[in-house]
Image (cartoon, coloured by chain):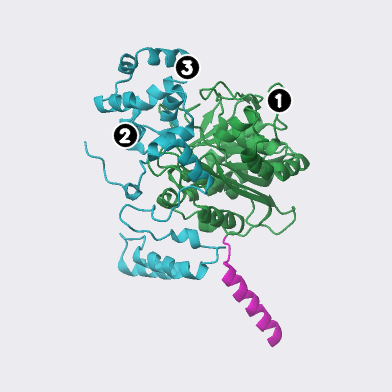
Chain colours: A green, B cyan
Amino acid sequence: MARIIAGVGSSHVPAIGAAIDNGKTEEPYWKRVFSGFEKSQAWMRETKPDVAIIVYNDHASAFSVDMIPTFALGCAAEFPPADEGWGPRPVPVVQGYPALASHIAQSVILDEFDLTICNKMEVDHGMTVPMNLLFGNVDKNSHWPCPVIPLAVNVVMYPPPTGHRCFMLGRAIRKAVASYPEDLKVVIFGTGGLSHQISGPRAGLINSKWDKAFLDNLSKDPQKLVKIPHVDYMREAGAEGIEMVMWLIMRGALDEKVDEVYRFYTVPASNTAVGHIILANRARGAKAPRKHKPTAAKHKRAAAQAKVERIRS
Amino acid sequence: MARKAQIYDDIPGTYVFDAERSREGYGINMFCMSLMKDDNRKAFKANEAEYLKKFRLTPEQAEAVLKRDYNRLLELGGNIYFTAKLGATDGHSFQHLAAVMTGNTQEDYAKMMFGGGRSVEGNRSRSGENTPSKFLTAGASAKKSAAKPKAKVKAKAKPKAKAKSKSKSKSKSKKRK
């Protein structure tokens, strides 16, 4: 049976891709960014996923304003890198996993998430930059280490899907993957963010406090995050910081309790706060997730009550 | 035509690309999209005003393109990921555009970014409201206790089930506690 074993959150700043493509990774400015992903690459080499689901957004590359799908799942056999105005990035064509992708599509649509299916799609830096950060630099004529199922989310036109909707889609994806008969290890990526605004007179906004609280809650209490209204993201984390909702799809696809394997945060890469996290599901056989998570306070109360009862008896 | 007022209009220095702007700015964005092809970039550069005629822009939109008024383009329905293609056609980096939109030199803007970026303090709202989002302080952060009572007050003030009978909404808000 297929199973999601871990989630990865990562920014997808285009300038990071440009730094890789132009051989600037050793410059101090960029080294600060790339050195934060060395451990993650080692983790990825060890983890060896059979397939990655990558939640990302297109930046006026595959989709213009002719069609703006809220959730678009890539079911093709391959996804060529898009020409974003400087020629396609010199990275390998991304291999898809059509069988699992169409299984996910069928499962989540019947679970009432109305996906758009893409049987032909080019992918831009939104997807290939996090792949570089986690898989390292891969020669254009070589292969990425595993096939990928892209899930493009509209975060360009307001309103993007709500954080809650994203989280629930993650849940539905988890269920879909778990019902796939092939024995596969799956890692899911949530990309974009963290705080940044690149448009208008307020461009350059960064909110590290917000970012840190987001990462903390992502790890320990994602239910707090699913309630954040869009206007709060835009006000606090910048107009384009709203991309952070995509991380909630990744989080929703994981178990309720996860182990934070690694975290990295630095400001800036070009105009953006770079955030990165690796969350791993606990080994199988651990407690099944409950439907309604009791709050920490309730836990404490219950524990105290149990203690009292033990003493009484 | 007046824009419908939106809650996010209160965010300073920000033009949210919503469905209304997406419709109004269709021509701007599709023009920018066309600049992904080299032949089109050359044609545009050869005669900008003539090239723009293909895209049904309003006179204000065409003027903003010709003047490279990037903030005005956003206001008139352009989206930054699209207008960046116009900047790229002029040979400008993204950071250059950001500097232009903020009224800074690129050097000063880059310095600001390297120093941690523009602070959110004082930049949350046009109306002067500068209280951090309650979600910023929620959960694992140290200011947990300060955030909690506020969240409760809000939940009380805005019962979701407005249309339902009083007794029902009361019992609902009780449950939520």
Q: Quadrant of the N terminus of chain A?
A: top right
Magenta stretch, residue numbers = A292-313
The disc label shown at residue A66, or none: none
Image coordinates of residue B159 in percent, x first then y, are 36, 63
| In-front residue for pair A184/B125 | B125
| In-front residue for pair A41/A253 | A41
User: In the picture provided, is A132 more to the left or to the right than A274?
Assistant: right
**Mark 3 residue element:** loop
Q: Chain of mark 3?
A: B
- At x 42% / y 25%, what residue is drawn? B86
**In 3D space, how far apart are the residues under numbered discs 2 and 3 (Cα atoms)?**
24 Å
| In-front residue for pair A233/B103 | B103
Q: Where does label 2 land, which residue?
A: B72
> Hey, what amino acid is under mark 1?
Asp
Question: Is residue A313 visible in this depiction of the protein?
Answer: no
> Hey, what amino acid is under mark 3?
Lys
A124 in relation to B8, above or below: above
A284 in relation to B92, above or below: below
**Mark 1 residue element:** loop
Q: Quadrant of the C terminus of chain A?
A: bottom right
Image coordinates of residue A280 in percent, x first then y, are 69, 50
Q: Chain of mark 1?
A: A
Q: Where does label 3 land, which residue?
A: B37
Question: Is residue A81 visible in this depiction of the protein?
Answer: yes
B12 in relation to A109, above or below: below
- At x 58% / y 48%, what residue is drawn? A171
Q: Quadrant of residue A285?
A: bottom right
Image coordinates of residue B130 in percent, x first then y, are 38, 59
Question: Is the stretch drawn in magenta largely helix, strand or loop?
Answer: helix
Q: Where does label 1 land, which residue?
A: A139
